[in-house]
Amino acid sequence: MQKQRYVPHPGWGRRGRNACVLQCVCLESPVGELLLSGCEKGIHTITITMETEHRSGLISDQAELNPELQKCVTWLQSYFRSAQSVISLPFPALHHPMLQGDSFTAHVLRILQSRVRVGQTVSYKELSEMAGNPKAVRAVGSVMRRNPVPLIVPCHRVLCSSGQSGRYMAGKGDHIKLWLLSHEGKKGST
C-alpha cells in the first residue's frame, strides 16, 4: 500500500523538473499518530493527530520509503525512545517551501532547529532576539503556529516569557507540549 502524489511548489511549472512526488506514512507515537509527508529531497510536513484513524493508501512497508522519509521515521522513533538519543543524529532534510529561502519565517525556524537543543527552552522574545528582531515577538508566535515540521523544528520548546507553556496546536495540544517538555527533561507551566 503506497501513497504517492505530485505536489508542485508555488511558482513551479506543472510537472516541471523540480516537482515533488510525495510519499506519506503514519507513525504511532506516545503523543498520537504522526502523519509524515516527504519527497526524495526532504520532509514536507509532520502532522500530529490526536485521533487514530485508518488511513488507506499510506505506505505500510517502510522499505518502500524514500531515504529522507526513512531517515525522518528513524529520527522520530529514536526521539520517542529517548529524547537525548537524537543529539548525535543528523536532522532529516527539510523540503517545505516555508523553510526555503531567506524569509523571516525560514530564518526563525532554522535558528530554532539549530540553536535550541533537546532539554532547552527559549521564550518567544528570546527567539525574536536570536532572529535579529527583538520587536517581532508576535511574528515569532505566528511562525510557531505555522511550523510545518513540528518535532524536527521544535516549536514545543518555545515558551511564554512568564515560563508558561503557551498554546500548542491552537490549544488542542497543550497536553502534548507538556508531555514533550517532560520527555526532554523540562517542565512547562500550564
Image (cartoon, rainbow, N blue to C red):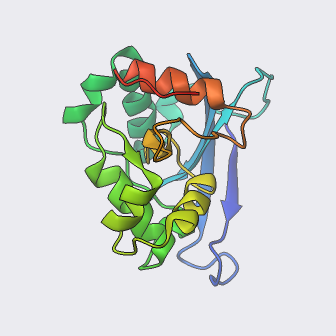
Q: Residue 138 sits in which quadrant?
A: bottom right
> Residue drawn 52% across and 20% down?
179
- In the displayed structure, would residue 154 be above or below residue 118? below
Residue 109 position in % (x across, y down): 43, 59
What residue occupies the far front of the structure in this picture?
162
Inspect this view and state whether residue 46 appears: yes
Residue 167 position in % (x across, y down): 64, 40
In screen coordinates, is 145 left or right of 39?
right
Q: Residue 134 sits in which quadrant?
A: bottom left
Residue 141 position in % (x across, y down): 57, 58
In screen coordinates, is 98 left or right of 58?
left
> Residue drawn 52% across and 27% down?
189
- In the displayed structure, would residue 13 be above or below residue 38? below
Q: In which quarter of the image is the C terminus?
A: top right
In screen coordinates, is 138 left or right of 15?
left
> Residue drawn 49% across and 46% down?
155
Q: Residue 154 sits in which quadrant?
A: top left
Pick whichever, 18 or 156, lies toward us: 156
